Image (cartoon, rainbow, N blue to C red):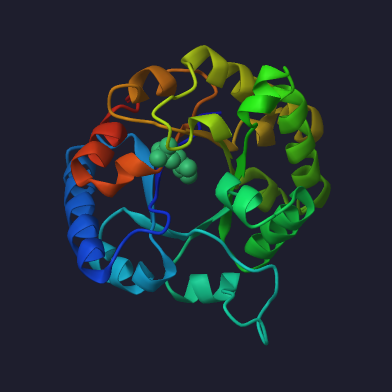
């Protein structure tokens, strides 16, 4: 099955209103032009901070660019001061939400079971979850990478909804913790090894058709210089981009790095 690729910009805790206006406008102009020229090979999703969602939504209207949040609460709504629900993100124009980013796992203590419940909440509220997985440097050095990935993935699969439409339409992002923001990306071979392992786990649990429709993104120090080699791997369906998504020029260059099979 032909999977559509995705390049996702995770702005993290960056993006004033003025910055959002400028960056969203520039990205949307570039993506719209590529779409018109039939050279756009992937979906493009911007994930600004909550405070900039409405500005981003305003500026991307009419373009193929889609909007995502960076986290949700597992709760439906109510007395949860400081939290944001999936339905509030939907209301703000989001189609996607990033969940289980290693910064949240490490800094805020989010564990596999909570990430899985947030995935369920995203599906419930009509969002496509982009769930992050990845090992630390110590875990890689101890040759625990695949075991760590399997544990994180197993927690998700245990709560994956039964509806085929949902099982087939979610996104996994392999982000080795040691590659995030360090300038040290995983090699294409390292990435393919983990992505191939994830695809095999998905195939064993969900069957070939569903497993082959799930997007698996790579994240961790992706730049215009290394994106093409990473995206050329058979199980790499695009990227989750941090630092390089904060400049239109570098983000668009990464979008252009996705191979065009049409
Ligand atoms: P960098 O691209 O800055 O390494 O960040 C990756 C990331 O964490 C995306 O979610």
- In the shown orientation, is residue 223 left or right of residue 113? left
Q: Quadrant of residue 140?
A: top right
Say whether residue 205 is visible.
yes
Q: Of residues 211 and 148, which is closer to you in this image?
A: 148
Q: Position of residue 25 (x, y in %)?
A: 19, 58
- Residue situated furthest bottom in the rendering: 79
- In the shown orientation, is residue 17 left or right of residue 173? left
Task: Check the image and report above or below for 225 versus 218.
Answer: above
Task: Check the image and report above or below for 145 versus 162.
Answer: above
How many numbered circles does the render carry? 0
Residue occupying the point 24% across, 33% down: 253
Task: Check the image and report above or below for 27 versus 94.
Answer: above
Say whether residue 261 is visible.
no
Residue occupying the point 63% across, 34% down: 134
Q: Position of residue 232 (x, y in %)?
A: 42, 18
Q: Name the quadrant where ligand 1 sits.
A: top left
Residue occupying the point 67% across, 86% down: 78
Residue occupying the point 28% across, 67% down: 16
Q: Position of residue 70 (x, y in %)?
A: 50, 58
Q: Position of residue 57 (x, y in %)?
A: 32, 68
- Residue situated furthest right in the rendering: 158
Q: Quadrant of residue 183?
A: top left
């Amino acid at each position: 099955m032909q999977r559509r690729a995705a390049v996702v910009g995770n702005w993290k805790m960056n993006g004033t209103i003025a910055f959002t206006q400028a960056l969203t406008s520039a990205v949307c102009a570039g993506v719209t032009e590529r779409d018109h020229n039939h050279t756009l090979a992937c979906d493009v999703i911007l994930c600004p901070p909550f405070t900039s969602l409405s500005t981003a939504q305003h500026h991307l209207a009419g373009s193929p660019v889609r909007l995502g949040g960076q986290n949700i609460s597992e709760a439906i709504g109510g007395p949860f001061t400081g939290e944001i629900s999936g339905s509030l993100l939907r209301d703000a124009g989001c189609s996607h939400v990033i969940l289980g980013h290693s910064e949240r796992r490490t800094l805020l203590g989010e564990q596999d079971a909570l990430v899985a419940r947030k995935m369920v909440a995203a599906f419930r509220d009509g969002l496509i979850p982009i769930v992050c997985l990845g090992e630390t440097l110590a875990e890689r050095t101890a040759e625990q990478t695949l075991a760590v990935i399997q544990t994180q993935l197993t927690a998700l699969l245990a709560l994956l909804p039964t509806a085929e439409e949902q099982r087939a339409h979610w996104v996994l992002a392999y982000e080795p913790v040691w590659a995030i923001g360090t300038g040290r990306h995983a090699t294409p071979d390292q990435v393919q090894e983990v992505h191939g392992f994830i695809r095999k786990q998905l195939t064993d649990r969900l069957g070939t058709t569903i497993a082959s429709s799930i997007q698996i993104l790579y994240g961790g120090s992706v730049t215009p210089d290394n994106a093409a080699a990473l995206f050329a791997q058979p199980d790499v369906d695009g990227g989750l981009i941090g630092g390089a998504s904060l400049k239109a020029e570098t983000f668009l260059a990464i979008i252009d790095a996705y191979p065009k099979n049409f």
